[in-house]
Amino acid sequence: MKELTKAEEEIMQVLWKLERGFVRDILEELPEPKPAYNTVSTIVRILETKGFVDHEAFGKSHQYYPIVAQDKYKSFFLKNFMSGYFGGSFEKLVSFFAKDNNLNVNELDQLMQHVRKDINPEEEEKQNGTND
């Protein structure tokens, strides 16, 4: 999988939201100032070449849809981001955000509780006594 350019990612965000769409549908969802129709069409075809989208033909029109799930790309992007900026260390990433956002110990504890709950929701339910 390749990392997307900013413009490609913007188009993919729209396609993930719409699930299927013609170029005009994608264009409608983009913020102002809107790019030209031909620009969006070109980017969608590049995304198709990169293996991110496919299309269904309706005469001369094409309806595009994502073939790479948003979560799959998100995971790929974050791993590359962590590798490039934090040496692949989640600890360095969290430490950076904690310092950058002036988080105190209580806020970090709350954050860790949310992480534990997301990683292992069944164990969290047992600890809170909500599992029947």
Image: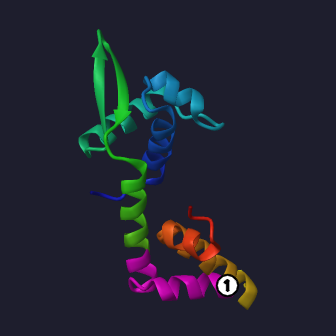
Q: Is residue 104 visible?
A: no
66 left or right of 121 in image: left
* Residue at the far front in the pictured view: 132
Residue ID at (29%, 21%): 56
49 left or right of 118 in image: left
Q: In which quadrant of the rendered image does the N terminus lie? A: bottom left
Instruction: Identify the amino acid type marked 1.
Output: Asp
How is the model colour-coded? Answer: rainbow
Residue ID at (29%, 57%): 2
Q: From the top left corner, tell me how far across and down residue 76 is, in percent.
A: 36, 63
Q: Which residue is mark 1?
A: 109
Q: Is residue 26 visible?
A: yes
For the residue pair 24 and 96, the one nearer the viewer reads as 96
Q: How many circles with numbers are drawn on the protein?
A: 1
Residue ID at (50%, 32%): 18
Q: From the top left corner, tell me how far across and down residue 117 is, in percent.
A: 56, 70
For the residue pair 29 and 45, the one nearer the viewer reads as 29
Q: In which quadrant of the rendered image does the C terminus lie? A: bottom right
107 left or right of 16 in image: right
Q: From the top left corner, tell me how far across and down residue 53 is, in percent.
A: 32, 38
For the residue pair 10 and 105, the one nearer the viewer reads as 105
Q: Quadrant of residue 34?
A: top right
Magenta stretch: helix, strand or loop mostly: helix
Residue ID at (52%, 82%): 93
Q: From the top left corner, tell me how far across and down residue 80 is, in percent.
A: 37, 71
**Mark 1 burial class by Cα count in 10 Å: few <14, some 14-19, many 20+:** few
Which region is colored magenta?
82-100
